[in-house]
């Protein structure tokens, strides 16, 4: 079995797979101070509830944008699962070619999302991730990752608006019935929702102009369904895109991972 781990700035997702069958998935808040023992205590309890024995886990693959989380996750993998954790972009190469100025600067999550999209959809592709940041990534018709755009996430924008404008409350992200709000809350909802929808469609349209044609647009992240409902350009919503990418990484490197496990057992 494979334990796939996606560490984002806000949430960390764990999933266990038997081949390509997902047996369980769990989401924890990302805590930069969490220790290996704390990770293990939470994860093993969740796996136990799903009746997944830890002894069955034979490989751990991690996508991580929070450097502080790497060491405790490596220790957790070694001490509680008897596995060496393989971090995408460090221990394992990306499964798709990159055509960017500095590949080392690209967030692993963005490339893993692109790899997941390639697993499920025909390129060219634009992948939008509604996360802590809202990212846009282009995969061209050859299946090459070409970079993209990064904008502040919706949650960050709302928090900044609340903090810096004393009389503006915290609000939920919802599409208001009208663009012209009749009170503060609906005016804020309009600005956030329609403003972000305009940002999304504006960037996707400009990418199309730059590359000479529209690409299939795939959205992921918690708020993706909310924006896809009103977007003319988002063709697919895929909540498991990152996990699909981690599976692609794993299967592209399975023999190397297995060889490393056998070598470690021999020692």
Image (cartoon, helix red, strand yellow):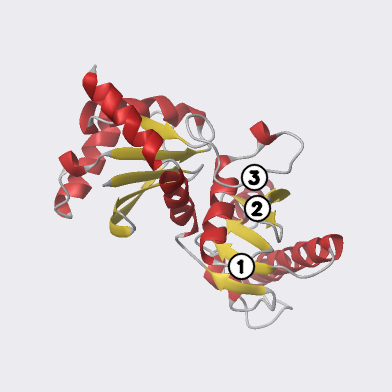
Of the residues under marks 1 and 2, which one precedes in the sequence?
Answer: 1
Of circles 2 and 3, which is in front? Answer: 3
Give the SS element for disc 1: loop
Of circles 1 and 2, which is in front? Answer: 1
Residue under numbered circle 1: 122
The x and y percentages for residue 187 are 69, 70
Q: Is residue 217 something that shows in the picture?
A: yes
The x and y percentages for residue 153 are 62, 52
Label placed on residue 97: 3
Of the residues under marks 1 and 3, which one precedes in the sequence?
Answer: 3
Task: Report, in whole angstroms, how far the alpha carbon at label 1 lies from the one at label 3.
Answer: 16 Å
- At a point 67% along the width and 61% down the height, the residue shown is 126
Give the SS element for disc 3: loop
- Seen as rendered, the residue at the extreme top is 267
Q: Is residue 165 something that shows in the picture?
A: no
The x and y percentages for residue 123 are 65, 64
- At a point 57% along the width and 72% down the height, the residue shown is 236
Residue under numbered circle 2: 135
Q: Residues within 10 Å of mark 3 (few under 14, many from 20)?
A: some
């Amino acid at each position: 079995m494979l334990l796939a781990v996606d560490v984002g700035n806000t949430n960390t997702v764990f999933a266990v797979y038997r081949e390509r069958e997902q047996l369980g998935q769990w989401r924890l808040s990302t805590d930069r101070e969490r220790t290996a023992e704390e990770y293990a205590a939470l994860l093993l309890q969740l796996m136990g509830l799903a009746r997944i024995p830890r002894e069955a886990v034979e490989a751990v693959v991690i996508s991580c944008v929070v450097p502080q989380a790497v060491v405790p996750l490596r220790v957790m993998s070694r001490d509680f699962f008897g596995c060496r954790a393989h971090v995408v972009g460090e221990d394992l190469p990306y499964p798709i070619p990159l055509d960017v100025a500095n590949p080392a600067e690209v967030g692993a999550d963005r490339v893993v999302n692109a790899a997941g999209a390639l697993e499920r959809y025909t390129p060219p592709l634009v992948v939008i991730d509604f996360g802590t940041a809202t990212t846009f990534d282009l995969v061209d018709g050859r299946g090459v990752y070409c970079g993209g755009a990064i904008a502040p996430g919706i949650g960050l924008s709302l928090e900044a608006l609340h903090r810096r404008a004393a009389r503006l409350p915290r609000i939920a992200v919802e599409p208001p019935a009208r663009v012209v709000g009749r009170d503060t809350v609906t005016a804020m909802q309009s600005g956030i929702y329609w403003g972000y929808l305009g940002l999304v469609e504006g960037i996707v349209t400009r990418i199309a102009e730059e590359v000479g044609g529209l690409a299939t647009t795939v959205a992921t992240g918690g708020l993706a369904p909310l924006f896809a409902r009103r977007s003319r350009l988002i063709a697919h919503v895929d909540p498991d895109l990152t996990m699909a990418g981690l599976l692609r990484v794993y299967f592209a490197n399975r023999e190397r991972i297995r060889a490393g496990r056998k070598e470690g057992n021999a020692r």
